[in-house]
Image (spheres, rainbow, N blue to C red):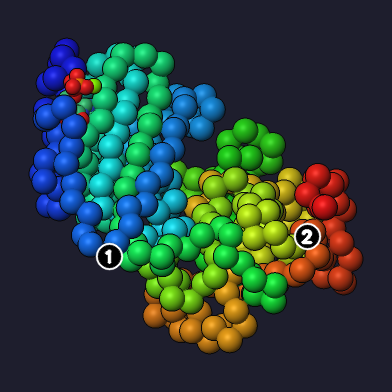
Amino acid sequence: MPSEFEIIKIFFDRPVSQTILGVGDDAALIEIPSGHQLVISTDMLVAGRHFFPDTDPYKLGYKSLAVNLSDIAAMGAAPRWVTLALALPEANENWIRDFSKGFCDLAEQYKVDLIGGDTNRGPLNICVEIMGLVPAGKALRRDGAKAGDQIWVSGELGNAALALANLQQKIKLPDDESTALLKALYMPKPRVELGLKLREVAHSAIDISDGLVSDLAHILERSKLGARVYFDKIPRSSILNKYIGNEIVKTCLLGGGDDYELCFTAPLARSNDILSISKAMNLPLTCIGEIVQDKKLTVLDSVGNEMQMMQAGFDHFGG
Ligand code: ADP
Ligand code: MG
């Protein structure tokens, strides 16, 4: 059984390319290029709360970095450095090998240096801190939305939540459909490239980790505005759409977490630029509504009626 130091040396001491001093000292050293701001975000994944303890370790390693990359993407920043604090119930070498491979494969893909962390024995817990760079003053913030902005989302929403609902047997899907949806749950693709492209186009952005309605509500709260969203326009997979009559599936689309797509707002005048970005990236970007002055979030159904489930959930939001 490897010791703590062996674990770090074997699995987490990786070559770095944009770091002055990485793993191995008391702390890491990085240099911030002039004219840039450092963007920092932390996310903790707790076994039993954010993932099932028996989740495939490779996918878990991947996802613990992916959710952090997603936060950097939502800021319009370029990811650069990451630290990893791990509590492990036992030093299971195979588990750690697969976990570190999932984490480091993604780090390599996005050119992020793993520059430090902490390794302890304890109930399984994964805490990642990510750092990125943005030209000074250019970050995409939640408080930048303007009345009249269009509201856009990337990709498709609700797949991860529907996969989870199926795992929890709240709905019963055929195997081929559940397999397709599980990819969204376990291996979300962080929209880093999109975030960088949106920097010159969008007024505000957030990544959808808790669900469209609650994450859009964060933009509205910080920007002191409201929104109208058209339910029929919310992009969804053909699998999800097949079951859209089911209330659980509606909730997956509007309120399901774990998609890690970006929701952003931009002036009408930039809609063609956004469609060009979509085309160039081969990534659907869909306008789902608009920002309004009245500080209320309304979701309208196909005939223009306010959806009831929204009224119940969002009483606290008005004001
Ligand atoms: P200290 O006792 O000074 O905190 P540690 O023994 O905890 O040092 O860590 C030794 C080195 O290994 C440090 O550079 C630390 O950042 C790094 N490190 C520890 N755990 C991890 C990990 N899971 N991933 C990456 N680096 C790690
Ligand atoms: Mg330590």
Quarter of the image with the N terminus is: top left
Mark 1: which amino acid?
Gly
**Along the horizontal axis of the image, is 314 left or right of 153?**
right
Q: Nearer the viewer, residue 174 or 180?
A: 180
Taking the spot 45% from the left edge, 71% from the top edge, the residue there is: 198
**Along the horizontal axis of the image, is 233 left or right of 68?**
right
Mark 2: which amino acid?
Lys
Q: Which residue is mark 1?
A: 35
The answer to whether residue 261 is visible is: no
Question: Does residue 92 lie above or below 30 as drawn?
Answer: above
Of labels 2 and 1, the one closer to you:
1
Q: Position of residue 163 (x, y in %)?
A: 57, 44
Looking at the rendering, the quadrant in which ligand 2 lies is top left
Question: Does residue 115 lie above or below 86 as drawn?
Answer: below
The span from disc 2 to disc 1 (Cα, nearest Å) is: 36 Å
Q: Residues within 10 Å of mark 2 (few under 14, many from 20)?
A: some
Q: Callout 1: helix, strand or loop?
A: loop
Question: Does residue 10 lie above or below 19 as drawn?
Answer: above
Q: Nearer the viewer, residue 120 or 305?
A: 120
Q: Callout 2: helix, strand or loop?
A: loop
Taking the spot 33% from the left edge, 57% from the top edge, the residue there is: 37
The earlier-in-sequence mark between 2 and 1 is 1
Q: Which residue is mark 2?
A: 295
